[in-house]
Image (cartoon, coloured by chain):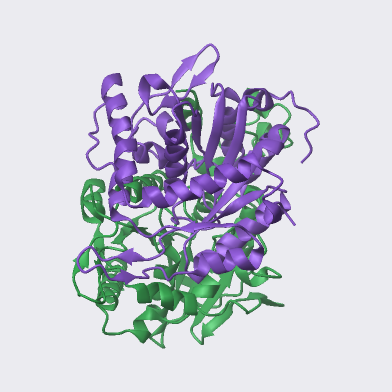
Amino acid sequence: MIALQQAQNVPDPLSVPANAPEHCPGTESELAGKSDACAGCANQEICASGKARGPDPALPFVNERMANVKRKILVLSGKGGVGKSTFTAQLGWAFAADEELQTGIMDVDICGPSIPTILGIASEQVHSSSSGWSPVYVQDNLGVMSVGFMLPSSRDAVMWRGPKKNGLISQFLKDVDWGTLDYLLVDTPPGTSDEHLSIVSYLKESGIDGAVVITTPQEVALQDVRREIDFCKKVGIRVLGLVENMSGFVCPNCKNESQIFKPSTGGGRRLAEDMGVEFLGAVPLDPRIGKSADYGVSFLDEYPDSPATTAYLDIIEKIKQQLGD
Amino acid sequence: MTSVTQDTPVGRRLRHIKHIIIVCSGKGGVGKSSVSAQLALSLYGSSPTTRVGILDVDLTGPSIPRMLGLDGHPVHQSSDGWVPVYADGSEARLACMSVGFLLKKKEDSVVWRGPKKNAMIRQFLGDVRWGELDYLVIDTPPGTSDEHLSLMEHMAPVHDKLSAVVVTTPQAVALLDAMKCLSFTRAVNLPVLGLIENMSGYVCPCCGEISNVFSTGGGEEMARREGLKFLGSLPVDTELVTLLDAAEVEESQPSEGEIVQRSFGILRRYEKTSTAPLFAKIVEEIVRSLQNPLTNGATSGS
């Protein structure tokens, strides 16, 4: 239908600037600066001259910073509230358990940053030095950057449209003094929009090692996750694998397992098969995971005997294997 | 946000709608879409003549078509704009519009930046032939960004019809985002009808023990602190999850007749879930607030 045709006319989602008019053909298109939609756009002349087909000016700086980062991993999901941030935090803690490794976590969920709370550093602030913004350190080898550290109060809403969000993401990549990192984990907001396109386009040259996609078992979530995997394919990101979260609930009273979010269409395992991606594992729903996140403590350390911990560690091992580490 | 010009295309379309309810929450996956769907179904079921519309502006993750069992249904174009999909078939009292209807394949992703999302929302508000409605329920994506700002901007001519319902789950991480959402409603002067706490407790189907999977009570506490009306808490209802997941919907394009039957089925089956009576109370409260805007005291932005 009408809207669909518009969607298809966009040749490469990465080449549409954040402040472009509605029907921008993309700066790398043959029609750049010449299509009807370009009339009145402030950048029309630049596009028409062909100069805009060059890279974003922030790119060299991003590349410079990212040259010291060995692995860059995105944590994605089309759906909200499936446990992206919780998983990112656990993954960060698990990597940082090895004292030899330096790990960074970058939270690009600008409107709903949860990472500071989950890592128990919500009251910290970012300091800037001559070498850039210093990340907030949870422990010596685990640095974190999030918009949550920059708000005067946790009640404040960040009411930004796309271009401002993109600006901050580019700053996170070029102005943060990460130092030398073995792993940089990027926690993303739900959906497939500005934040995702920005992070992918800024990291295109330095290379993204892969994405871990999180889902919950019910079809309503799987629907969105299918779209996210489709997005990864469109922009050429390798999917390291799919994690099914909140999979089955063990009643603390009778110890019987029941399915809160029923995998009515086969759950994550089936989706992984259908889409041709690796199924990394299923993490059962343990109320203590959510509680640990609320209190900002590491679930893996607090409850090493929980079946969820075993599942997490298995998945993390598989991710390392996928990366070849 | 002043209503200087009533005469925008959006203003003209929405003039015939009595109340517009925006369902929002800062956090994703707390049940905005499920609450929106339930709100629409409950309002629809509240009287045999109530006309309800449901608009899904979650452009990159539309869930409403699936939840109402309308997956794969096409949208038709008429001389007077897009015809919404009627969930109840020929009775045409439950109109539904979502970007999900415009996608060819269910795994197609909508990878749009802000300006395109803004354009789509303007089309949804200005080009859809809603007709006369008693209620228009708007389901929003998580966050406080393009979609939300666009909604408020385009609906400025009908600002006096707008109100919001905030949904949260009880855990601290979600409450934090709900607080941000509330700050947003205050910044744009959007009256809040109240707060719903979703996924509050889970009854083990085996032994009946209530587990607070995502903690409990946080929503009520937040409502009290912020001077909001607490509309109620809804436990995790697996029956409802399964119903809204519409497991048995086959992928083939269903004929008109089948759609009618199935959707009535959804309402009938929804009314049998244990959540339905709890939600009916919430809806009663919402309808009362909407009818006596002066008595719902501490709701508008402070």
| A45 w.r.t. A68: above or below | above
Question: Farthest residue toward the right?
Answer: B4
Q: Position of residue A221 (x, y in %)?
A: 35, 50
Inspect this view and state whether residue A90 appears: yes
Which quadrant of the rendered structure holds the C terminus of chain B?
bottom right
Question: Farthest residue toward the top?
Answer: B79
In this rendering, position of residue B182 left or right of residue A236:
right
Q: Among the chains, which one is green?
A: A
Q: Position of residue A226 (x, y in %)?
A: 34, 46
Inspect this view and state whether residue A114 appears: no
Asked whether A247 or B265 is in front, the reply is B265
Q: Position of residue A55 (x, y in %)?
A: 59, 48
Asked whether A9 or B302 is in front, the reply is B302
Asked whether B47 or A111 is in front, the reply is B47
In this rendering, position of residue B140 left or right of residue A1:
right
In this rendering, position of residue A230 left or right of residue B182:
left
Q: Residue at x 47, y 70 (%)?
A: A184
**Occupied quadrant, residue B186:** bottom right
| A23 w.r.t. B153: above or below | above
Q: Residue at x 32, y 31 (%)?
A: B264
Across the whole image, how many numbered discs are drawn on residues?
Answer: 0
Which quadrant of the rendered structure holds the N terminus of chain B?
top right
Q: Residue at x 59, y 58 (%)?
A: A111
| A276 w.r.t. A25: above or below | below
Q: Colour of chain B?
A: purple
Q: Position of residue B275 (x, y in %)?
A: 37, 52
